[in-house]
Amino acid sequence: MFCSRCGSGVADGTSFCAACGQPVAGVPSGPISSAPVVSAPVIAAGAQNVAYAGFWLRFVAYLIDSVVVFAAFAALILISIPIFGVSYLQQLASGLSNSEPDFSPALIFVIFDLILAISVAVWLYYAFMESSTRQGTLGKMAMGLTVTDTAGQRISFGRATGRFFAKIITGLVPFAIGYIMAGFTAKRQALHDMIASCLVMRRT
């Protein structure tokens, strides 16, 4: 105990300071703070809340995204019918179903444009959604998943683009092992996550 006026030491149980006569408030001095110790468990608890998304959660999210993409392109095809005309589309269909199809420049152009449009649209869907404030596609949002960098922060459009095209490498690994890695790696990363330095997290 210390006197609040003169700072002299005061024995426990003493009502007045022997040096200056100041009444002792009875509040103990300095070494009572254990406050820094309290903050440590809070930080530790926050670290324990980190939850990586495993293979099956991500697989279900992929199925949902596949349905969304398929529905979008089905709608696009329905819209294109009145634009190009039914007869033109029937000619294309008959050319494709013929045992010896005549691949005219027009048919090749349509097929190439269709493949290109699908590829670009799927890329933009994944890259924009995963780099947005939602940090995930509609499928991931439905499953409560987010895509982050290795520090847990929102990724840029460029990194989301790199992650998307890294899936080409993942798909080249036999038996889908590049994707299955998300079920047994330490941070539940698939191969394309490792290439792009990304994580897929569960919202907590």
Image (tube, rainbow, N blue to C red):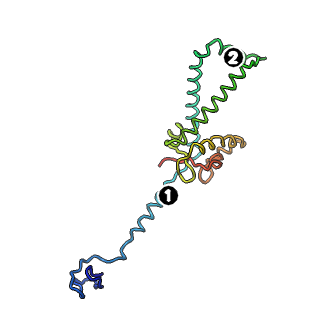
Residue in front for this viewpoint, 54 or 26: 26
Residue displayed at 28% across by 76% down: 27
Residue placed under numbered mark 1 in the picture: 47
Q: What amino acid does circle 1 point to?
A: Ala
Instruction: Tell me the SS state at disc 1.
Output: helix
Q: Which residue is mark 2?
A: 92
Along the line of sight, which residue is nearer the eye, 34 or 88?
88
- Residue 137: x, y in percent? 54, 38
Residue 171 appears at what percent x and percent y?
69, 40
Image position of 38 with respect to 69: above or below:
below
Q: Label 2 to label 1, Cα distance in Å?
A: 58 Å
Q: Decide if residue 60 is in sight here.
A: no
Outermost right residue: 100
Quarter residue 33 falls in = bottom left
Residue 129, located in which quarter of the rendered image? top right
Query: Residue sitting at 52 percent across and 45 percent down?
Result: 146
Where is the N terminus found, in terms of image quarters? Answer: bottom left
- The type of residue carrying mark 2 is Leu
**Residue 42, can we see it?**
yes
The image's mark for residue 166 is: none
- Mark 2 vs mark 1: give the one in front: 2
Q: Position of residue 114 (x, y in %)?
A: 65, 26
Left or right: 199 in relation to 91: left
Question: Farthest residue toward the bottom?
Answer: 18
Q: Secondary structure at mark 2?
A: helix
Q: Earlier in the sequence, mark 2 or mark 1?
A: 1
Q: Position of residue 123 (x, y in %)?
A: 61, 36
Please state the total of marks drawn on the protein image: 2
